[in-house]
Amino acid sequence: MENLLVDNIFVELALVLLAGVLLGVFFFAGLWWTVSQLKSTRHVALLFIFSLLFRSTIVIVGFYFIAGENWHRLLAGLLGFMLVRLLATRYTLQQEQTPSLGKTLIVDKIVDKQEDSL
């Protein structure tokens, strides 16, 4: 009977971890969308503030329901959220460091023209 209790706790924490991951995906995908829309809007500050308030409210309410009265569940949810943050940070840094094919072709043409002029 005790093994069943332990298994249920692990399943519960795994589901809470998954819920934290989903909250993280929502938050950081919303942040990415907001940043991508900033160039095309006339009201940058309003978009940014309302997006921040909306995303933060959803995440805080989500953590409230996830945690209940158990700090272990809150910790597991935060761990899932932070995992998404870590992955999103690594992904964006990798995208900044990897030149796109179009940029590479333009740089190659500039270098070729400079070599021809010498």
Image (spheres, helix red, strand yellow):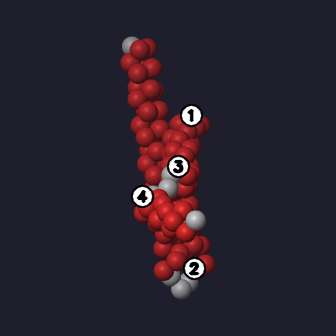
Q: CA distance from mark 4 to mark 3?
A: 15 Å
Q: Quadrant of residue 82?
A: top right
Q: Which residue is mark 4?
A: 101
* Residue hosting label 2: 44
Q: Position of residue 15 (x, y in %)?
A: 41, 37
Could you tell me how far apart the alpha carbons at marks 3 and 1 are, in whole angstroms? 33 Å
Task: Specify which label sits upstream in the sequence, 3 or 1.
Answer: 1
Quadrant in which the N terminus appears = top left
Tell me how many marks there are: 4
Question: SS class of the residue under badge 2?
Answer: helix
Amino acid identity at mark 3: Gln
* First reached walking from the N terminus: tag 2 or tag 1: 2
79 is higher (above) or lower (below) than 109 = above
* Mark closest to the chain's N terminus, 4 or 3: 3
Mark 2 or 1: the one toward you: 2
Residue 94 is tagged as 3
Q: Nearer the viewer, mark 3 or mark 1?
A: 3
Q: Indicate the secondary structure of the residue bearing disc 3.
A: helix
Q: Residues within 10 Å of mark 4 (few under 14, many from 20)?
A: few
Q: Which residue type carries mark 1? A: His
Q: Which one is in front, 17 or 62?
A: 17
Residue behind mark 1: 72
Upstream in sequence: badge 1 or badge 4: 1
Q: Is residue 103 visible?
A: no
Choose mark 4 or mark 3, whichever is in front. Answer: 4
Position of residue 63 measured from the top left corner of the image (x, y, whole percent): 53, 49
Residue positioned 55% across, 39% down in the render: 79
Compare marks 4 and 2 and give the one earlier in the sequence. 2
**SS at circle 1:** helix
**As shown in the figure, which amino acid type bears the numbered disc 4?**
Leu
- For image coordinates 50% across by 82% down, the residue present is 41
